[in-house]
Image (cartoon, helix red, strand yellow):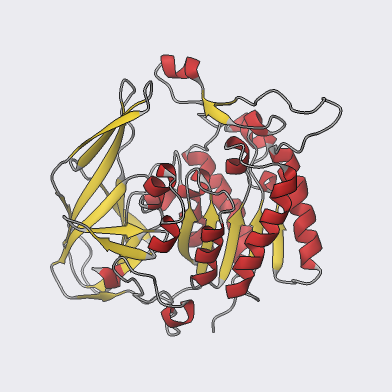
Amino acid sequence: MKEFLRGAVELERTDRGYLPHRLPAWARAQTPDPQLAMVEAQPSGVRLALRTTATVIELDTLPTKLVHAGFPARPEGMYDLLVDGELTTQLVARGGNTVTVDMSTGTSTFAAGPVVTLRFDDLPTGDKTVEIWLPHNERTELVALRPNAPATPAPSRLAAFLDDAATPAPADDRVVVAGGRAVWLHHGSSISQGSNAISPSAIWPALAAAQSGAELFNLGLSGGALLDPFTARTLRDLPADVISVKIGINLVNADLMRLRAFTPAVHGFLDTVREGHPDTPLLVVSPIFCPIHEDIPGPGAFDLAALREGRIAFQAVPEPAAAPADKPDGRLTLRLIRDELARIVEQRAAADPHLHYLNGLDLYGEPDHAELPLPDRLHPDPATHRRIAARFAKHLAPLIPDLG
């Protein structure tokens, strides 16, 4: 199964199957953050890609579903099957493990469940490329893949470079020169991971990749776009023909740093990426419009009134200002981050002609919010994912190199 997997850096052997990871083990060992550990193992953008004449494919999978006690059930993870790039079938794995979280106490309980068999049948006859996109929001262990005809890995510039729970080989050893599309490597927050999207092939990075003709490697990490050095080194070491990094919202809603730390952290992050990709087109993307943090610093938190109504929504809850109102203390807001990112990119682009800036308001701005408001005040809905994808693809396509 490993040879068919795309969009993961490692495949860990578990007691019951194989768990795709989007961050390597050495990176995961450098932070105790349970949020990051959870979301990097949710296979956003990860898919099985094969060439086959099979008309039936069975996939044994073990999902781990997250339940918030006392709240409406979250949408279950979807498995999207595409034939030659066209979505044909969507299935949900009914079963698997469950983690139940008590929002009032912060405690969680785990209940083991059965492996689930998904059967994709009535596939068209003849040779074709089949992709099975794994849930973007649900930890997924892969147990077995059974096509009813021989299958080979679909052509890809990403080789089957996965090592079981080991450090991947250097990037140059993992690029397949013959066949496949240009590889787009993207990093961002929960919006890039796909929060509130309806299915894994409908998250905005997946849609933008399809529209621009690129092969996606998605390092969108919910709550985890924090300029971590290990993330920069992961981007540095992965194969890529074009790279984008979306910076801002998590730094504000985590209240992680002030402007004094932000500016050199951005420089250091970009410096590290450039160590592995000195001439690769690199697009720095600032935050989309988000009213709760445009001019109000973090941290962000759940809206307790909404929780009491059985809804999940977010709000800004900044601490009292440490400096007088007429003397800014460097607390980050989205407006401040956009201005500083534009300045940083302009400064660096004088010596780096392959570095570019995209204002997130060009993807989703205040007029868009008036038409398509963020349902939980933080994450876009499915229609907005489509809008962001279409706009982003227009900026991405010109950066994709001609591979001949």
Q: Can I make out residue 50 in this image?
A: no
Q: Is residue 261 left or right of residue 315?
A: right
Locate residue 320, reporting x and y percent. 69, 23
In the rendered image, the vertical position of residue 398 relative to residue 70, given as above or below: below
Locate residue 143, reporting x and y percent. 18, 58
Q: Is residue 63 left or right of residue 107?
A: left
In the rendered image, the vertical position of residue 157 relative to residue 384, given as above or below: below
Residue at x 76% of width, y 49% of height: 340
Which residue appears farthest toward the right when viewing the image?
326
Residue at x 47% of width, y 44% of height: 222
Locate residue 289, reporting x and y percent. 65, 38
Residue at x 60% of width, y 67% of height: 273
Task: Give 149 or 93, whichever is nearer the viewer.
Answer: 93
Q: Which image quadrant: the C terminus?
A: bottom right
Q: Can I make out residue 339 in this image?
A: yes
Q: Which image quadrant: the N terminus?
A: bottom left
In the rendered image, the vertical position of residue 115 relative to residue 180, given as above or below: above
Residue at x 61% of width, y 67% of height: 272
